[in-house]
Amino acid sequence: MSSWLEKFEFGLGRTVRGMRRTFRRGIILLGLSVATPSLAIAADWDPATASSNFGIFALSDAQLAERKIAVTPIGELELPTGEIIACDPLITTDDWPALARRVKPGHYPVALFEAQGRVAAAFLRFRPGVPVRWELATLPGQDVSTLNGDEIFGYPVDAGLGSFMDKAAMALMSAAQDKLKPDQNYYDDVLAAEFAPNQDRFVMHHPDAGNPVNVAMFWSGWGDGFYPSFWGLDAAGDLVVLMTDFGVLENADGREGDQAK
């Protein structure tokens, strides 16, 4: 196992114990020099059409450095209900549904893959290990077998941010927004000061001061768009990670242009 993954999983042991919309885009698939995990395929739709970066968890420290990718742990996410919402936290209302899959309530580490001065992907880790197959993360009622070609399910971004949060956190954040004065907005008057120490890249935000329930917020790659999330599973079918890919990397490589060839 790569040492970056071992370091990231050190705290995980304590943790584990204790509407359809589609977006079309072209994906350039290049060959990885490491073994790429097999993919879970629903009908004729292949997750590899939506992300070429699943092999990133098999990369070593040296390979990440060669590909100009940095791994940045940002803290632990509290999931009191185990119902996860992945969304742009500033445009999503409290009626946005949680993902169809649920996880065991607890607190789990969040980290970012950063490249080209951007947050390339964010992931929430549930157990040690490297995923061996992948599924598109869906909302209740979404059916992956209805997708064609490079269609995806995901979430829209219009404020340049992505996030992971528990369903309970969404309710707390909505209540906090309702308390703002008419001339205030949540980013400028609440979040900006919290983002600043991290060069505006990420924050673990507590919408209710003193309440441990929090929200992992982070830049969304190059900004606004429509982004998919994926469940990574182990050989037994247990969840290992949830990853949102923001389209910065290609084939688990953060280098620009000809350097990635």
Image (tube, helix red, strand yellow):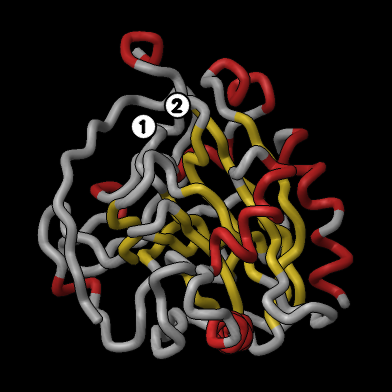
In the drawing, does residue 35 fall left or right of residue 66?
Answer: left
Q: Nearer the viewer, residue 218 or 126?
A: 218
Which residue is labeled 2 in the image?
253
At label 2, the amino acid type is Asp
Kindly identify the residue that appears in the image at 21 percent across and 76 percent down.
Answer: 20
Q: Farthest residue toward the front?
A: 183
Quarter containing the C terminus: top left
Q: Residue at x 73, y 81 (%)?
A: 208
Among the 4 quarters of the image, the one containing residue 210? bottom right
Secondary structure of residue under mark 1: loop
Q: Which quadrant of the view contains residue 71?
A: top right
Residues under numbered marks 1 and 2 in contact, where contact means CB atoms less than 8 Å apart = yes
- Residue 250 shows which numbered tag? 1
- Which element carries disc 2, helix, strand or loop? loop
Amino acid type, residue under disc 1 in the picture: Glu
Position of 46 with respect to 148 (left or right) is right
Q: CA distance from mark 1 to mark 2?
A: 5 Å
Q: Is residue 257 visible?
A: yes
Q: How many marks?
A: 2
Q: Is residue 128 above or below residue 201?
A: below
Report which quarter residue 112 is drawn in: top right
Measuring from the top left, give residue 60's x and y in whole percent: 65, 28
Residue at the limit of the structure toward the top, as seen here: 258
Most foreground residue, 190 or 255: 190
Quadrant of the frame with the N terminus:
top right
Q: Residues within 10 Å of mark 2 (few under 14, many from 20)?
A: many
| Residue 78 % position (x, y) | 73, 75
